[in-house]
Image (cartoon, helix red, strand yellow):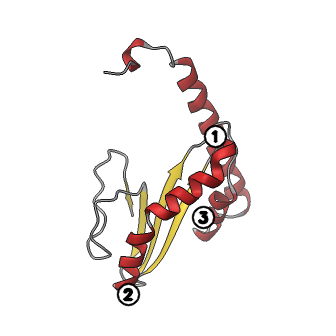
Amino acid sequence: MRVDLSQRLIFPSEVAVTNLRPDLVLWSKSCRRVFIVELTVPWEEAIGEAYERKRLRYANLAAEAEGRGWSVKVWPVEVGCRGFVSRTTTKLLKEMGIRGQAQRRAVKELAATAEQSSHWLWLKRRDISWAAK
């Protein structure tokens, strides 16, 4: 598993060669299976558009990996900026084996974090240190 927290993730070269940097890559060499996970926090009204944009962004990468014999699933997941957790997010959790109470807890935490982060951004909207340079 690789997570791009510092924006320096290098996609596993045994899967495919690319300059794209998904937020999370889960892969199994023995199963030759890859999950490419890309998180988006859009306005709730734009969740469908965000999903499609992220899906298309990784379509060529998925095709290249499949051409190399890998089973690939691209998971664009969306958590709305006001806390709405999309169905794709709950489907991913289920696919990863997170079900029942653990899934409900994860969804609740995702929603709360998105809402708190959006509120923080709103409070900082006029902060001078954020001015365009």
* Crowding near the residue tagged with mark 2, few <14, some 14–19, many ≥20 C-alpha atoms within 10 Å: few
Question: Which is more foreground, mark 1 or mark 2?
Answer: 1
What is the number of the mark on residue 69?
A: 2
- Which residue was labeled with disc 3? 92
Q: Amino acid at mark 3?
A: Leu
Q: Nearer the viewer, residue 4 or 56?
A: 56
Question: Residue 47: where, in percent of width, then height?
Answer: 64, 50
Q: If the image is split into quadrants, where does the N terminus sit?
A: bottom left
Quadrant of res 29:
bottom left
**Residue at coordinates 42% horizontally, 73% vertically from top-left?**
62
Under circle 3, the secondary element is helix
Up/down of 111 relative to 27, above or below: above
Task: Tell me the CA gap for discs 1 and 3.
Answer: 20 Å
Nearest-to-viewer mark from 2 and 3: 2
N-term-proximal mark, 2 vs 3: 2
The residue positioned 65% from the left and 54% from the top of the image is 48
- Which quadrant would residue 75 be assigned to in this image? bottom right
- Badge 2 marks a residue whose secondary structure is loop
Identify which residue is drawn at 40% across, 71% down: 60
Residue marked by disc 1: 43
